[in-house]
Image (cartoon, grey):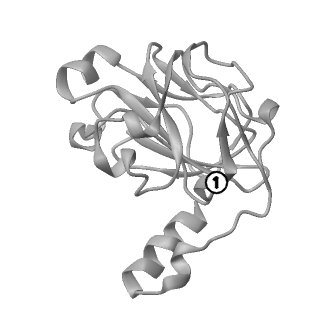
Amino acid sequence: MAGFFKKITQSLKGDSAAEQLPVEKGLAEESFVMPIDGTVIQLSDVPDPVFAQEMMGPGFAIDLAGDTICSPVDGKVVSVFPTKHAIGLESETGIEILIHVGLDTVKLNGEGFDLLVEKDQSIGRGDALLKIDVGYIQANAPSTITPIIFTNVSKEKIHLLKEGKLAQGTSGILRIDA
């Protein structure tokens, strides 16, 4: 997520170049799989304006039905938040992905999350990243809706190809053109 953090740093410094971090490579349909059982929804339908208005970047969201977040891509773990509610990945093609489990879950201070990976670890599609206690999150956070954000991709390059209920490991959900 080097580009994501660079973008935030440049924004804080007032650098307008922060708005334009181009992606050099895309992501083929078969290179991205559903990270957990659930219902795919448009990011604009997420009940949190930071995500719905794409302030952190474009993407989609999943209304969770499973309890283990798996890697949607081959690549590496580039960031693990201390509160375990979010993980940053980078695909082999350089696409940066933020998986943010639930809404306002940072306030849970790591409760309800069991981290299964560490920063800089290589990962493959389907590798388990995070075990979650869905019941705990439902009882203690506003929502289990999980935004999947592409932090270094411009809006017009993402093509969401499937919505609705999907099983973990399903491919063909989206494509990102170079």
How far across and down, in percent of the image, does residue 161 sit? 67, 29
Determine the residue positioned at 40% across, 87% down.
13
The amino acid marked with disc number 1 is Glu
Task: Please state the total of marks drawn on the protein image.
Answer: 1
Q: With 37 as the anchor, is 74 left or right in this view? A: right
Q: With 50 as the anchor, is 131 left or right in this view? A: right
Front in this rendered view, residue 42 or 73: 42
Q: In which quarter of the image is residue 175?
A: top right
Determine the residue positioned at 28% across, 43% down.
106
Front in this rendered view, residue 82 or 27: 27
Which residue lies under the disc numbered 1?
156
Q: With 152 as the anchor, is 45 left or right in this view? A: left
Residue 101 lies, with reference to residue 65, above or below; the image says below
Residue 24 lies, with reference to residue 57, above or below; the image says below
How far across and down, in percent of the image, does residue 174 sit? 69, 34
Front in this rendered view, residue 2 or 117: 2
